[in-house]
Amino acid sequence: MNRLAGVTSPYLLQHADNPVDWWPWTPEAFEEARRRDVPVLLSVGYSACHWCHVMAHESFEDQATAALINEHFVAVKVDREERPDVDAVYMEAVQAATGQGGWPMTVFLTPDAEPFYFGTYFPPEPRHGMPSFGQILEGVRSAWADRRDEVGEVAGRIVADLAGRSLAGAMPADRRPPGPEELLGALMGLTREFDAVHGGFGGAPKFPPSMVLEFLLRHHARTGSEAALEMVQATGEAMARGGIYDQLGGGFARYAVDATWTVPHFEKMLYDNALLCRTYAHLWRSTGSDLARRIAVETADFMVRELRTEQGGFASALDADSDDGTGKHVEGAYYVWTPEQLRAVLGDEDAEFAATCFGVTEEGTFEEGASVLQLPDTEGLVDAERVASVKRRLLAARDERPRPGRDDKVVASWNGLAIAALAETGAYFGRPDLIQAATDAADLLVRVHMDWHARLHRTSRDGTPGANSGVLEDYADVAEGFLTLASVTGEGVWVEFAGLFLDTVLLQFTSEDGALYDTAADAEALIRRPQDPTDNATPSGWTAAAGALLSYAALTGSGLHRDAAERALGIVTALAGRAPRFIGWGLAVAEAALDGPREVAVVGAQGDPATVALHRAALLGTAPGAVVALGAPGADEVPLLQDRPLVDGQPAAYVCRHFTCERPTTDPEELTERLGG
């Protein structure tokens, strides 16, 4: 029988009606495989994954395929977003064996969870040199029945290879964080990979490089490098005007399938939008760009409007596919337009204007003559009010289309990223509603995701926590979000919660030499304890922890947390020159460490106009990774505020490094100059 009906993962629930006898990842599943003496078929995906849906429809909904699976395998379905540890371990094996990876991930395991055959998507019939899924199933079944010793040898070699992999050789002997030379080397490496024509880095497919852009902004703030800023501006504008950005509803798709940002893979992920919202807000902070401001605010509004749950958290994703109006699920159907569709909504004259404005042609830029909306730079050339009117009418018409599905599970780490983005965007642009949305999400994480021992559940759904434990990125990103929220609101309780989570990082995730693991010491044991410091779609748990530890140390004066952050940054020293695109957040944290980071204590009565002005100047300072504490005189929730008196009875700001402070100032303009705003 299919055992997925009672789970909380929306992705697993999509498979609850399959004829495949799916199990969730549990010890009982492997016990069943051992009892029946059959291999385990492990299928890993996520709800917004287009090819996961394709393989499900072609194979897992097919009665004959399901019968073959049920007779000869124990089938285990895993949501990679719920169990990133399981995903990471077996994806490492897939990539080592095949040179590539992706989802759906298909792995065959022994009943001891040892992998022996790998793949990703398999078609229902042989295609483009790929065997069919049925052929794969028959081949594995035959090998298990007739060549068991060979299967065992392969599995043993793979497990031994994975166990022998270590980061020890990559870490510098002194575990020192990157210095100016390594950070300059990273900049040079990024310059070589920069696409000077279309923005971004590398070719197709092209992913939004939010963490690299944050490093470049911080590098520019510390050094004045114009090359760093130009790469951010060019990339930010290209993405904002391209098809990867939803020109009607705001928010970014996962990636562009081309090098020009024209055609996206249409799924929208919370983490991308949280990271990019913050990046554009910081770009505005550095340059005053109206475009950056608009994109930051629209992306924040998208997250609140489309992803916020009834409990106050933020859902994981919107699907790429939706009903095209005929009952067929098609990628991008919700977002693309033909000239005929424009005319039906706008009439001939405005449709012609909209087609020119948004790049809609008869030939189309997508499939079947449809176009992805883009917005070339037409400022001063077209009527802005007319553009706004057209956008409103098209958005209203699009709202009548069948909507993409939403994965409404709440992931702790991604909500931490959203909290940081919404808090800062709300503070920068006078949007208290966004700050409140960030606060509500933080409340949910404390209420639902945190237990009495300050341990985190990774996910929740409908206010019910999932059974899966938090991984390193959950503790680190939630701490980052809470520290940012404290800087914006002046509520020191968020610093206290962040400290609890970072203590868990030190106790459960950190080795004696300062290296970090993705899973806790007391987590379920897998064939390998995952450990990956490189940034991918989100900051790695390793670099996110380094950043949160550094900020917490700056607010509290904790040498323990500062030392842990610096040891963790040793891996960035090793990777800065070799792979800067894949350690962007680590490089950004290293910039903060090199700058101090600056510690700003703003002392005064909250709501006092003079306090508000100083606080705003502090938040808008561009000093890399600067931390801000706000409190009334005598406040002691945050150590940085202790013993900071008013100056001549006036609110004051203290700018410090390592708790050694310059003379206080009561002048917001002087504070801005000190912080590089």
Image (cartoon, rainbow, N blue to C red):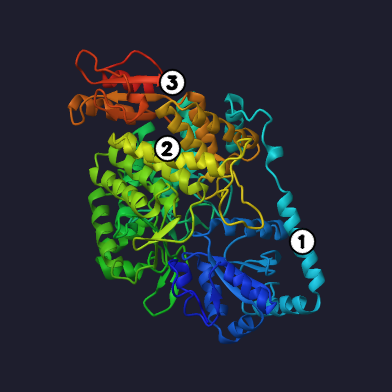
Measuring from the top left, give residue 492's x and y in whole percent.
Answer: 32, 35
Q: Which residue is mark 3?
A: 657
Q: Is residue 273 left or right of residue 472?
A: left
Q: Nearer the viewer, residue 581 or 564?
A: 564
The C terminus lies in quadrant: top left
* SS at mark 2 in the image: helix
Q: Which residue is mark 1?
A: 156
Question: Callout 1, which amino acid?
Answer: Gly
Q: Which is more foreground, mark 3 or mark 1?
A: 1
| Residue 350 visible in the displayed image | yes
**Crowd band around label 1 with a 10 angstrom C-alpha radius: few (<14), some (14–19), many (20+):** some
Name which of mark 3 and mark 2 comes first in the sequence: 2
Name which of mark 3 and mark 1 comes first in the sequence: 1
Residue at x 29% of width, y 29% of height:
630
Q: Which is more foreground, mark 1 or mark 2?
A: 2
Q: Are marks 1 and 2 in contact (CB under 8 Å)?
A: no
Q: CA distance from mark 1 to mark 2?
A: 41 Å
Q: Is residue 356 left or right of residue 111?
A: left
Q: Which residue is mark 2?
A: 499
Residue at x 55% of width, y 49% of height:
520
Residue at x 71% of width, y 80% of height:
138
| Residue 368 visible in the displayed image | no
Name which of mark 1 and mark 2 comes first in the sequence: 1
Residue 41 lies, with reference to residue 428, above or below; the image says below
Question: Callout 2, which amino acid?
Answer: Gly
Q: Which is more foreground, mark 3 or mark 2?
A: 2
Q: Residue furthest front?
A: 452
Residue 44 lies, with reference to residue 185, above or below; the image says below
Measuring from the top left, give residue 404's x and y in whole percent.
Answer: 38, 67
| Numbered mark located on residue 659 in the image | none
Residue at x 40% of width, y 55% of height:
374
